[in-house]
Image (tube, rainbow, N blue to C red):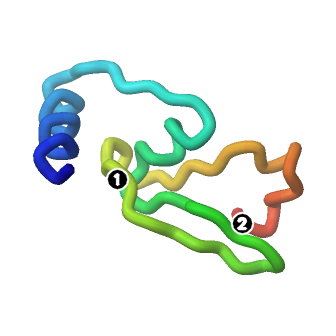
Amino acid sequence: MPGVQQALLDANRAGTVMSGSSAGAAVMSKLMISGGSNGNVYTREGLGFLPSLVLDQHVRQRGREYRL
């Protein structure tokens, strides 16, 4: 999989538009929120397209304000 990730990073740096919704959006950051409950937040390494951002999804709908 590292070869695929590098190819995607190269394409992104070359100006290819990348998009996603829900988990597809969250994985674009370098640090990705992968889960959590009871005040705990779990992170994993994302693809790194947006190295200075952390994206979360469905915050209000699923009561995830604590994750922010």
Find residue 9 and report its image quarter. Answer: top left
Secondary structure beneath dot 2 equals helix
**Amino acid type at mark 1:** Pro
Q: Name the residue under label 2.
A: 67
**Eye-nearest disc, 1 or 2:** 2
Cα distance between the residues tagged 1 and 2: 19 Å
Secondary structure beneath dot 1 equals loop
Q: Which residue is painted at 56% across and 49% down in the image?
A: 55
Going by the picture, which residue comes out furthest to the front? Answer: 1
Q: In this view, does 52 lie to the left or right of 64?
A: left
Q: Which residue is painted at 43% across and 61% down in the image?
A: 31
Q: Which residue is painted at 80% across and 59% down in the image?
A: 64
**In the rendered image of this protein, does residue 21 appear above or below residue 1?**
above
Q: In this view, does 35 lie to the left or right of 6?
A: right
**Amino acid type at mark 2:** Arg
Numbered mark located on residue 51 in the image:
1
Find residue 61 and report its image quarter. Answer: top right
Mark earlier in primary sequence (1, 2): 1
Q: In this view, does 57 lie to the left or right of 61?
A: left
Q: Position of residue 39 (x, y in %)?
A: 78, 79
- Quadrant, the C terminus: bottom right
Q: Which of 35 and 30 is in front in this view?
A: 35
**In the rendered image of this protein, does residue 37 appear above or below residue 59?**
below
Q: Nearer the viewer, residue 59 or 7?
A: 7
